[in-house]
Structure formats: structure tokens, C-alpha cells
Amino acid sequence: MHELAVTRSILKIVLDHTEKNGGKRVRKIFLQIGEIRNLEEEWIQRYFDKISTGSLAENAEIKVIKVPVVFLCKICKNEFSASFREEKKILCSHCNSFEYDLLTGREFIIEKIEIE
Ligand SMILES: [Zn+2]
């Protein structure tokens, strides 16, 4: 996902929500973003500041909660995390299996929008 496209969709959701609830201004936006998405939070804020100018969401602060990547091994049921920035293969930290499911890390959730 590209930061600018993501930020546009956040702004649209936030403005819809604010208008529906009769808000005059957006104060804060809380996001949950899985680490697998590899989004740079400072870019989200920067793009947001740009594209929200003149809207109800101008000057809103974006708070990002990063959700770590956690896998569940299908063989031994071990839960383990791994970094996607490293190029090496991901294996279960307990039994070295490569059969696992992604438990968390793919999130992209607007958790809360504070409006006035
Ligand atoms: Zn395992």
C-alpha cells in the first residue's frame, strides 16, 4: 500500500464520519497498522496535513499504534514473530517449520476518531 493512497482513504472515512455525527472539527485519529504493511507513519501525517487543508480534518493529529507480526506454527502451535525487513526465510522459531498462519500484523484499522 502506498502512503498517499492510504491517507486519502483515511481522510474520506474520517470526513464521512465527522459529517454524519455533526462534528465541526477532527482532533485526533487513532490507527492500528500491522507491521507487515510497512507504512511510514510520519508520511501518513505529512500527506494528511496536505490533503486535509481546508477540510474539517485540518490539523488533526494521527496516532499510529503498530501491531507486531505474529505467526502461529501449524505443526507445534508455537507463536513467534519475525521481521519482514530481513530478506531471509521465515521459519518457526521452535521447530523450524515453514507451515504457519499469520495471526496479527496485517491490520489496517481506524480505531477511533475524536471530533468536536
Ligand atoms: Zn513450530
Image (cartoon, rainbow, N blue to C red):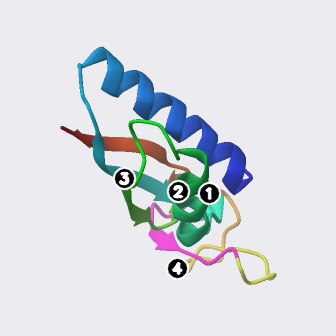
Up-down: is 80 above or below 5? below
Give the SS element for disc 2.
Answer: helix
Q: CA distance from mark 2 to mark 3?
A: 8 Å
Image marks 3 and 4: residues in contact by CB distance under 8 Å: no
Label number found at residue 68: none
Chief secondary structure of the magenta span?
Answer: loop
Q: Which residue is mark 3?
A: 60
Residue drawn at x 81%, y 81% as measured from the top left = 87
Question: Residue 13: percent from the left, percent from the top?
Answer: 47, 29
Pointer 1 or 4: first along the chain: 1
Q: Identify the secondary structure beneath mark 4.
A: loop
**Label 2 vs label 1: CA separation?**
5 Å
Q: Quadrant of residue 56?
A: top left
Q: Amino acid at mark 3?
A: Ala
Kindly identify which numbered label has been placed on residue 47: 1
Secondary structure category for the residue under label 3: loop
Q: Is residue 52 above or below residue 59?
A: above
Q: Is residue 71 on the magenta stretch?
A: no
Residue 2: percent from left, percent from top: 74, 53
Q: Is mark 4 within 8 Å of ligand 1?
A: yes
Q: Which residues are magenta?
A: 73-84
Is the C-beta separation of discs 2 and 1 under 8 Å?
yes
Specify whether 99 is left or right of 101.
Answer: right
Mark 1 vs mark 4: give the one in front: 1
Q: Amino acid at mark 1?
A: Tyr
| Left or right of residue 13, residue 1 in this image | right
Q: Is mark 2 within 8 Å of ligand 1?
A: no
> Residue 110: x and y, percent?
40, 42
- Quick one: label 4, few (<14), some, or many (20+) residues within 10 Å? few
Please state which of residues 31 and 75 is positioned toward the viewer in this rendering.
Answer: 31
Q: Which residue is mark 2?
A: 49
Residue 94, numbered label: 4
